[in-house]
Image (cartoon, helix red, strand yellow):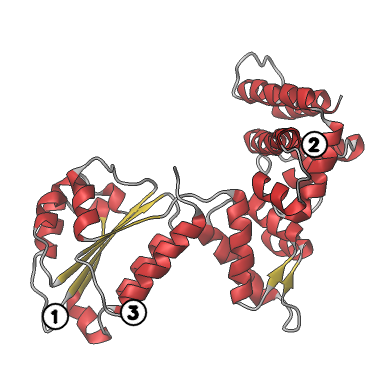
Amino acid sequence: MAKKLRDVITDYQRIIADLQKKIYKPVYLLMGEEPYYIDRLSQYIAEHVLNETERSFNQQILYGKDITTPQLIDIARRFPMMSNQQVVIVREAQDLKKIELLETYLRRPPASTILVLCHKSKPVDRRTSFYKLALTGGEVFESTKPYDNEVQNWITTYLKEKGCTINPKANAMLVEFIGVDLTKITREIDKLFTLLPENNKHITAEHIEQNIGISKDYNTFELNTAIAACDTLKANRILNHFAQNPNGYPILLTITALFMEFSRILKLHFLQRRRTGALSDREAAAELGINPFFLENYKTAAKRYSLTKTLEIISLLREYDMRSKGLRNGAATHGDLLRELVYKIMH
């Protein structure tokens, strides 16, 4: 089971606390799909373990594609100059060929070297001796890709720490436009800080639209809202905008957003059937993985789309996902497919 974002943050904070106490491990294997905390940990080590003078002689930043594993082992086994320790950081360690050869190094790592491996995009194979040795003799940190609802909570916390707030719709738009890449999100948020008036530390949908590039009227969030409310006019207006701007609104992303929406509606149906007592809004929102602010939209949608209809819609989404990839599609454009799909959903 993938780690939850809060567990990733807990591990990150624990490692930072140890580093602040100068409790160092001989090897740090920082791995996973989400690079934000991997970069923050490696940057902290690069800036705080050695002082400025020591870094000149005893810190090396390497890249996995530029060195071989034997070369890395030779570098890591060198003695530091005029210092008790040296730091060797390997960025993009996933490009290091035959990384498993580091097993020999990890069996007897020198106490004077701190080796940091930033293995992004995917975790290291846990079955290997290399991984097991890193786990027992060093520090293994895994940063998994978070879910949308986790990221929205994370954004709220991140902004709160900076003395700023964001309304739920703006938060949802931010995640929809940027995705769950925490590095990109923080980059855009930090850009927004410089544009907000000094006396206004609250981010709205208008700020997102004006400064990040997403339209507050034409996006999959608004399309989902229109479909949930059976607002045919608004849905068609959004679909026409999508059809005129296919590069900005890829059909696969739209179908994925619709699938997530109706998966939640389906889950709400089952929650309502499964629970004999009243289900509180907070409990329902937690089960669906959404901000309670949006729960009424899902309740409305569940009333308009029965359990049977919702199951039919999910089947439709699978069918049109395949058609968008060319299977039994004929000459229909992506715009045609979306209009046809949404018509079948709403009628």
Amino acid type shown at disc 3? Gln
Report the residue at 23% width, 48% height from top. 131
| Residue 43 circle label | none
Residue on which the image places disc 3: 20
**Picture quadrant of residue 151:** bottom right
156 relative to 21, above or below: above
Tell me the distance, in whole angstroms, between the alpha carbons under discs 2 and 1: 63 Å
Residue on which the image places disc 2: 239
Foreground of the two, 223 or 128: 128
Is residue 197 rendered to the left or right of residue 77? right
On the image, the x and y values in percent for residue 16 come to: 37, 72
Residue on which the image places disc 1: 84
Amino acid type shown at disc 2? Leu
Tell me the distance, in whole angstroms, between the alpha carbons under discs 2 and 3: 53 Å
272 relative to 104, above or below: above
Residue 93 showing in the rendered view: yes
